[in-house]
């Protein structure tokens, strides 16, 4: 029962990503989108905390948690790109998605070849995710507060995010094919 609750918390992040995406593409209720983004962040912390606290992990949870994170990031970057009419954000989001697909393929390859350590999540990859989420937070805050100057900071952080994203993808590739 507890594992089901933890997995439901994780799955709620995917549902929240879809709702926030819809709010963004409809140019509607940015403040609500920002609040739901915070809730999604809480679910990310909460599912991991509960799984560790009660020593309740499942294969499904191990698989779906990073997927939920990726869906949240990808949907929101694309939603922001549409909302801000920004090919720039859309292009960067496309590169980030490409990297995620590539690293997923590397993980499958390494799993099939008993080399799972080559694509084990690194500290830098965790920083990458944090910066991606912070970037989304900046953009959502800019929209919710109508402080468009914040968009510049979002643009700076999305470039930093892209660089770290591509670097970690490159490092996973090197570890896989060394």
Image: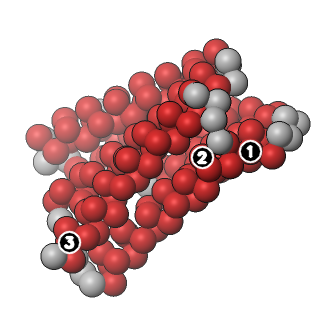
Residue at 44% across / 62% down in the picture?
A: 44
Judge whether 125 appears above or below 26 on screen: below
Q: Position of residue 163 (x, y in %)?
A: 61, 34
Q: Describe the element under mark 3 as helix, strand or loop.
A: helix
Residue at 52% across / 49% down in the picture?
A: 129
Q: Position of residue 79 (x, y in %)?
A: 55, 30
* Furthest residue in direction top, as rendered: 87
Q: Is residue 92 left or right of residue 119?
A: right
Cα distance between the residues tagged 2 and 3: 28 Å
Q: Is residue 57 left or right of residue 35?
A: left
Residue under numbered circle 1 = 144
Given residues 129 and 47, the one toward you in this image is 47
- Tell me whether the residue at label 2 lies in contact with that at label 3, contact meaning CB atoms closer than 8 angstroms: no
Residue at 50% across / 24% down in the picture?
A: 95
Classify the position of the N terminus by image quarter.
bottom left
Given residues 19 and 91, the one toward you in this image is 19
Q: Describe the element under mark 2 as helix, strand or loop.
A: helix
- Tell me whether the residue at label 2 lies in contact with that at label 1, contact meaning CB atoms closer than 8 angstroms: yes
Given residues 86 and 143, the one toward you in this image is 143
- Tell me whether the residue at label 1 lies in contact with that at label 3, contact meaning CB atoms closer than 8 angstroms: no
Judge whether 122 appears above or below 27 on screen: below
Judge whether 83 appears above or below 153 on screen: above
Q: Nearer the viewer, mark 1 or mark 3?
A: 1
- Mark found first going from the N terminus, 2 or 1: 2
Cα distance between the residues tagged 1 and 3: 35 Å
- Mark found first going from the N terminus, 2 or 3: 3
Residue under numbered circle 3 = 3
Q: Position of residue 99 (x, y in %)?
A: 43, 30
Location of residue 11 (image quadrant): bottom left
Residue under numbered circle 2 = 33
Q: Is residue 108 left or right of residue 157?
A: left
């Amino acid at each position: 029962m507890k594992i089901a609750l933890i997995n439901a918390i994780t799955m709620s992040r995917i549902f929240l990503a879809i709702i926030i995406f819809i709010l963004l593409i409809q140019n509607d209720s940015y403040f609500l989108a920002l609040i739901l983004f915070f809730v999604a962040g809480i679910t990310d912390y909460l599912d991991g905390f509960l799984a560790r606290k009660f020593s309740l992990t499942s294969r499904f949870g191990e698989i779906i948690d990073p997927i939920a994170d990726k869906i949240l990031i990808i949907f929101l970057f694309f939603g922001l790109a549409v909302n801000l009419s920004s090919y720039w954000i859309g292009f960067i989001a496309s590169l980030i998605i490409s990297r995620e697909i590539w690293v997923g393929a590397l993980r499958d390859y390494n799993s099939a070849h008993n080399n799972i350590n080559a694509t084990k999540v690194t500290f830098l990859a965790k920083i990458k995710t944090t910066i991606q989420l912070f970037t989304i937070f900046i953009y959502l805050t800019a929209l919710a507060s109508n402080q468009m100057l914040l968009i510049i900071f979002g643009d700076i952080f999305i470039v930093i995010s892209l660089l770290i994203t591509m670097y970690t993808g490159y490092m996973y590739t090197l570890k896989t094919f060394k």
